[in-house]
Image: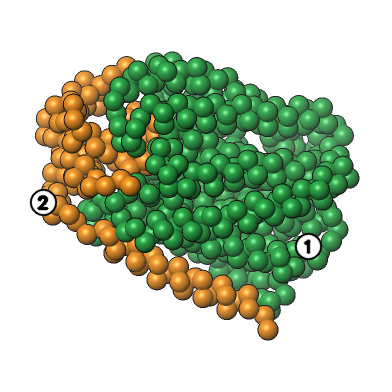
Chain colours: A green, B orange
Amino acid sequence: MKENFKQNPALWFIATGLLALILGVFFGLVGSFQYIIPDFLAGSIPFFKSRPLHVSLVISWIFLAAIGGVYYYLPIIFKRNFFYPILVKIHFGIYFFTGIIILYCYFNGIFGGREYFEFPPVLALPIAISWVFFLLNFFKTIRGKFKTFPVYVWMWMTGIIFFLFTFIESNLWQISFFRENPVRDISVQWKALGSMVGSWNMLIYGTSFYIMEKIKGDDKITNTRITFFFYFLSLTNLMFNWGHHTYIVPASPVIKNISYIISMTELLILFNIIRNWKNTLKDVQKNFFSLPYRFLFAADIWIFLNLVLAIFISIPAINFYTHGTHITVAHAMGATIGINTTLLFSSVYFIFLKEKILSEENNKKKFSIGFWMMNISLFIFWISLIGAGITKAMEENHPFAVTNFMGLMNELAPFFNLLAISGFGIFLGILLLALPLLHSVIFPGRKN
Amino acid sequence: MDIKLPLFISLSALFLVYSLFVYTSGTELTHPEINNSSASRGKALWQKHNCIACHQLYGLGGYLGPDLTTVISQKGKGEQYAKAFIKNGTQRMPDFHLNEEEIQSILDYLNSVSLTAVTYK
C-alpha cells in the first residue's frame, strides 16, 4: 500500500463502510430467518432490533463508501487537496463515534422509532454538523467556474446539498406542527425519505460516471448535452417523484398528480438505456475483464430491471394494490444492493486496484464466484419478493385490509423460505467480494 | 449561454416552494379532537418500542406484522381486538409489558390515525 494512501481518510470511510456492509447484510439475514422461524434469536436480537440494525448499517455502507469516493476522487480531479483537510478527519470521527453510539442504542432497545434511517433524535445533530463540514469543504475545494465542471461534480454537489436538506426535513417531526398531525407527518416523512434516496443516488451515480470516463478514457462523455439532460431529469425526479409513495395518503391530490407525471418521465431514461443497448454490449465485450467495469455492467442490468418495476408501481391503478406489499421491498432491495452496492463495489475496486493495494490476479477466482453469487442470489431474492408482493396484493382488496394476517403469512411461507436461502447466497457473495478488500487494508504487507 | 447553474437554482427554488405546499396543503386536521395528549403519548410509545419495524401506517414500515392504519375502524377489528394483541403479544410479536394507561394511549394514537384515513385513493 502506498504510504500516502494509508493515511488518506477516504480509505477510512471505505474500510468502515465495508465493515458496515458485512454486518448490515448479516443482520438482514437474521431478519429473513425470523420470517420463517419466529423464535430465531428472539431473545437477543428480536426483529424490532435486527431490522434497524440491517437498514441503518446498509445505509451507512452506502454513505461511507460514496463519501469515501468523493474524498478520494475530488483532489485528483481538481489537482489540489481538500481546502480544510482537518475537516475530512473530523467528518470521519463524528460519523464513526455516532455510528458506534447508534449501534449501542439498538442493542439496548433505544430507538428513534422512525422508518429507515432512524436513531434517537439527539444523534441527528452530530450527523447534520458533519455534513455541513462536508458541504463547506466541498464547495471551497471545487471553487471555480461551474459551467466547466463535468456532470459527476454536479451530481456530487447535488447529493451533498439535498442530503442535508432531506435529513433536516426527516427530523421535522420533532416540531409539534408536524408531529401532531398524522397526515402531515406521514407525507413529510415519505417526502424526506424519497428525496433522500435520490440524494445518495446522485453521490453514487456521480462516482460511476467518473469511473466510466476513466475506463473509456474519454472525458467528453461526462460533458455532453444529453448527459446533462439526464442529470436534470434525475434531479427533477429527486425533487418531485417521491409522491408515488403517498397515493394512499389523504394529502393534497396535487402532490399525487405531479408525482405521477414526473415519475413517468423515467420512461425517457428507460428508452435511453434500450437505445444504447448495442453500444453497451460492445463495451461489455471490450471491458468485461476489468472488475470495476463488470460491476458497472451488472448495475446497468439492475437499473433496467428496477426502472421497469418502478414505472409499473408508479401507475396509480397498480400502486393501489402493490403499495404496502413486498413489491416495494423488492424495489428497495434491487436499488440498494443491485444498483447502489454494485456501483460502490465498482468504485472501491477501482480505487484499490489503482492504488495497487489489491491484486485482481491473486483473487480472480474468489471475485468471480462472489460476483456471480451475489447477483444470481439477488435476482432470486428479488423475484421471491415480487412473488410475495403479488400474492399479498391478490389476497387483499385494499391497502389497509387485515383480513387474515396469519393465513396470509402461511401462504407467503414458500416465498420467505426462498428469501432466506437466497439471502444467505447474497451474504456469501458479499463476503467473497468484501473480505479481500478489508484484508488488504488491515494487513497491507501480506499477499493481497 | 450556459444555463446549468440558473436551471439548478430555479429548480431548487421551485422545490422549496413545493416543500412549503406539501407541509401545509391537504393536511388540515379533519378531526381536531384526535390531537389529544393521550394520542401524543401513544405516538411516543409507538416510537419508543419501534413498532414501525414490523407494522405499517399508510404503507410506511415493516412487513412482519399487518398494516395498522385502519385497525381501529375496520369491520371485525377495533379497540378490543388491537388491545388483545398489545397486551399479550403473539408468537411473532413480543409482549412489551405495557400498563393499562400505556395500552390505552397506543389505542388512542391508532384511533387518531384511523380517523384520518378518509380516503386511500
Q: Is disc 1 placed on a helix, strand or loop?
A: loop
Relative placement, left or right, of A419 versus B77 is: right
Q: Residue B33: which numbered mark, if any?
A: 2
Relative placement, left or right, of B11 versus A436 is: left
Q: How many marks?
A: 2
Spot occupied by residue A262 in the image (x, y as percentages of width and height) = 51, 59
Identify the residue shown where x is 23% and y is 47%: B118
Residue B57 lies, with reference to residue A182, above or below; the image says above
What residue occupies the far front of the structure in this picture? A317
Identity, as a three-letter code, of the amino acid under mark 2? Glu
Identify the residue shown where x is 40% and y is 71%: B17
Spot occupied by residue A225 in the image (x, y as percentages of width and height) = 72, 69
Identity, as a three-letter code, of the amino acid under mark 1? Ile
* Circle 2 crowding by C-alpha within 10 Å: few under 14, some 14–19, many from 20: few
Q: Quadrant of the N terminus of chain A?
A: top right
Mark 2 in CB contact with mark 1 (< 8 angstroms): no
Q: Using the rendered view, name the quadrant where residue A340 is placed.
A: top right
Identify the residue shown where x is 64% and y is 51%: A270
Spot occupied by residue A304 in the image (x, y as percentages of width and height) = 65, 44
Name the residue nearer the viewer: A368 or A76.
A368
Residue A87 lies, with reference to residue B57, above or below; the image says below
Residue B3 lies, with reference to residue B88, above or below; the image says below
Name the residue nearer the viewer: B49 or A369.
A369
Alpha carbons under labels 2 and 1: distance apart: 58 Å
Asked if residue A105 can be seen in this view, the reply is: no
Query: Which residue is under mark 1?
Result: A221
* Circle 1 crowding by C-alpha within 10 Å: few under 14, some 14–19, many from 20: some
Name the residue nearer the viewer: A442 or A61.
A61
